Image: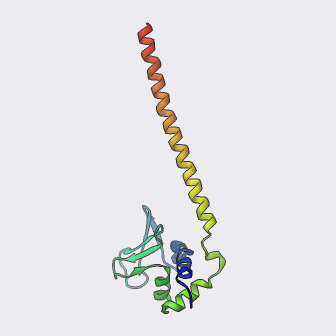
Amino acid sequence: MISQDEIEAIKHGVELVSFMKARGVELKQVGENYRGFCPFHEDTTPSLTVNPKENLWNCFGCGTGGDVIRFVELIHGVDFKEAVRRLAERPPSEVRSQRTEDRKAAVKEKKERAQRGRQKAAGSGEQNSEDRGQKSEKTG
């Protein structure tokens, strides 16, 4: 029997957007989420939403949704146990690299810190030039 920790690792080890696209679901980014046509019913407007941060999906048209395991259950018509087995045996190319995710987060944080530093420096530069202008007026 597979443990809850292993199930969680499987759920978080799959990048849901890429996984769904690889199975024929056309998704377009809208803000932080992705939208597309639900593969589980006739869809005339994009009613499927995928939240990549939470690694969850939801269809507002048919009311179904969930994680990658639920998607595999529905797309392949299998039960939970078989869906977990299929995900556990997927090719390494489909396994999300935690190190890659960590690197992306570190680069983003570094850029944000640099941006805050530039903004702070720009703000103090303006203050210094204002101070110099006031001193010139007093001496002049």
Give percent across and percent down for residue 21. 52, 75
Q: Is residue 4 above or below residue 31?
A: below
Q: Is residue 98 left or right of residue 11?
A: right
**Which residue is at 54% across, 46% downward?**
113
Q: Is residue 123 above or below residue 78?
A: above
Q: Quadrant of residue 93?
A: bottom right
Q: Quadrant of the N terminus?
A: bottom right
- Find the residue positioned furthest to the top: 140
Nearer-the-camera pick, 84 or 64: 84
- Find the residue positioned furthest to the right: 92
Q: How many marks?
A: 0
Q: Is residue 27 above or below residue 109?
A: below
Give percent across and percent down for residue 101. 58, 64
Q: Is residue 114 above or below residue 65?
A: above
Q: Quadrant of the C terminus?
A: top left
Q: How is the image coloured?
A: rainbow
Give percent across and percent down for residue 121. 52, 34
**Which residue is at 54% across, 91% downward?**
82
Give percent across and percent down for residue 64. 37, 82
Q: Is residue 1 left or right of residue 127?
A: right
Q: Quadrant of residue 92?
A: bottom right
Nearer-the-camera pick, 9 or 48: 9
**Which residue is at 34% across, 77% downward?**
60
**Which residue is at 55% across, 75% downward?**
14
